[in-house]
Image: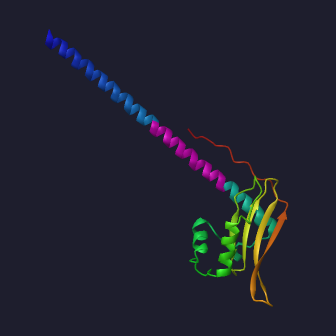
């Protein structure tokens, strides 16, 4: 009788552990599928935002007649190199100090609802440009241009803001699921 009782208990324990393993593997698979879906959605959203910003940039270039060959874009890596004086060809201390000042003192403030600014550095090394689209569709350039005062050899930067009518900020494209 004891053997039968032990055998039933062992059988019950085996079934319980088996079911627990099946549940655990199902939960792991569902979790993996969920993480995969989240990663996929993040990737799709990133593409949507990049496409939107590219469309905005094309409109800004067109309305302000910007020749991209005259500028380099300062993405986060190049901006850090520039601010530390390590960007090849751009070691002008006055220009670097001005950019640090602009960033530290929040001299560049885009209105709420504006797109992420594109930061451009003139290849001649005499101006920094923040290009963005305001929420009402105005294409805006916030330019900090280096000017020298000949009488005192001081270097100054004038702040010029140029605005032009542009297209409205495009909506993010809807997600198309291909399942």
**Could you say where residue 156 lies in the image, as x and y percent from the top left?**
76, 80
Q: Nearer the viewer, residue 136 or 95?
A: 95
Displayed quadrant of residue 1 = top left
**Which residue range is magenta in the image?**
31-50
Q: Is 135 rendered above or below residue 24?
A: below
The residue depicted at 72 percent of the width and 58 percent of the height is 55
* Residue 99 horizontal/vertical position (percent): 68, 72
Judging depth in this view, the residue of 141 and 111 nearest the camera is: 111
Query: Residue visible at 26% across and 21% down?
Result: 13
Instruction: Pick out the residue farthest to the top.
Output: 1
Q: Is residue 139 left or right of residue 81?
A: right
Residue 23 colored in magenta in the image: no
Give percent across and percent down for residue 24.
38, 31
- Residue 34 in percent (x, y) is at 50, 38
**Coloring scheme used:** rainbow
Residue 87 picture quarter: bottom right
Q: How many marks?
A: 0
**Horizontal side of residue 49 vs 170, given as left or right:** left
Our reading of the magenta stretch's main secondary structure is helix
**Quarter occupied by residue 90:** bottom right
Which residue is at a point 58% across and 41% down the rendered structure image?
178
Residue 43 among those drawn in magenta: yes
The residue nearer to you, when weighing 73 against 105, is 105
Q: Residue furthest right?
A: 165
Is 41 on the left or on the right of 140, as rendered?
A: left
Q: Quadrant of the C terminus?
A: top right
């Amino acid at each position: 009788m004891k053997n039968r009782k032990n055998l039933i208990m062992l059988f019950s324990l085996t079934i319980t552990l088996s079911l627990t393993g099946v549940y655990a593997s199902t939960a792991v698979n569902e979790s993996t599928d969920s993480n995969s879906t989240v990663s996929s959605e993040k990737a799709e959203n990133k593409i949507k935002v990049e496409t939107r910003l590219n469309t905005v940039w094309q409109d800004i270039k067109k309305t302000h007649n910007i020749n991209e060959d005259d500028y380099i874009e300062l993405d986060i890596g190049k901006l850090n190199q520039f601010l530390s004086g390590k960007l090849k060809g751009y070691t002008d201390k006055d220009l670097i100090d001005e950019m640090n000042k602009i960033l530290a003192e929040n001299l560049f403030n885009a209105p709420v609802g504006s797109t992420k600014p594109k930061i451009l550095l003139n290849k001649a090394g005499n101006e920094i440009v923040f290009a963005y689209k305001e929420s009402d569709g105005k294409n805006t350039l916030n330019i900090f241009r280096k000017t020298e005062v000949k009488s005192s050899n001081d270097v100054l930067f004038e702040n010029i803001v140029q605005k032009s009518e542009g297209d409205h900020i495009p909506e993010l494209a809807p997600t198309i699921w291909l399942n």
